[in-house]
Image (spheres, helix red, strand yellow):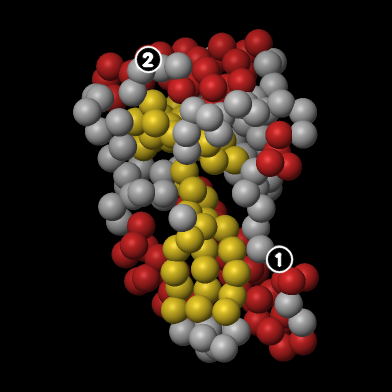
Amino acid sequence: MFIQTEDTPNPQSMKFLPGRDVIGRGELGVDFPTIEAAKPSPLAAALFDVDGVTGVYLGGDFVTVTKDPSVDWVHIKPAILGTIADYLAAGIPVLDEGAAGGADTAGSADDYEGETREIVEQIIELIETRVRPAVAADGGDIVFHRFVEGDGIVFLTMKGACAGCPSSTMTLKSGIENLLKHYVPEVTAVEAVA
């Protein structure tokens, strides 16, 4: 199995593209920021067994691995490639049955009423169609968390390569905030939720 790799804007994260679905396109990705969180995923748990791995994100058709800054990619990349290839080639499920339900869930327009619901629907639509595909290209994900009506603040959760990326604050403020403010005048600011 050939697995393509791509650098991400986060120098501690690398995107691995196996050329097939990992959890399925269109699915909300699953973030495993610690070895304890990786228990529902045999693949993520196996990746944490590679010395130096500090985070795993399973996307629709990619895996993003984050490493400790003291470890060089040249030393751990072969083990990561082998682990991903072994799991996918053997047909071993990457998530235990029902594990996707344990993933962080996105906020929903159903949590709001009236005009605020319409605003949130616009925000979610923009994130889904314009922001998430671009962020996924960099090995991460961004998910709507909530909207504070009176203040106009949108809270988003950053995952994968985007979590902890040195340029994530600039992306959030300069890119996403400006996009949302342009199309949804009720938005005054965008903030990240850990």
Disc 1 from disc 2: Cα separation: 40 Å
Kindly identify which residue carries mark 2: 78
Residue type pointed to by label 1? Ser
Q: Is residue 113 visible?
A: yes
Q: Is residue 97 left or right of residue 43?
A: right
Label 2 secondary element:
helix
Give the percent coordinates (x, y) of residue 13: 36, 37
Quadrant of image for the N terminus: top right
Crowd tier of the residue under label 1, counting other residues whose Cα lies within 10 Å: few below 14, some 14–19, many 20 or above: some
Give the percent coordinates (x, y) of residue 192: 45, 63
Give the percent coordinates (x, y) of residue 173: 37, 70
Label 1 secondary element:
loop
- Above or below, 45 relative to 151: above
Kindly identify which residue carries mark 1: 108
Kindly identify the residue that appears in the image at 77 percent across and 70 percent down.
110
Residue 18 is drawn in which quadrant? top right
The disc at residue 23 is none
Residue 90 is drawn in which quadrant? top right
Q: Please state which of the two labelled residues, at mark 1 or mark 2, is closer to the viewer.
A: 1
Kindly identify the residue that appears in the image at 46 percent across and 84 percent down.
188
Give the percent coordinates (x, y) of residue 31: 54, 41
1 or 2: tag closer to the N-terminus: 2
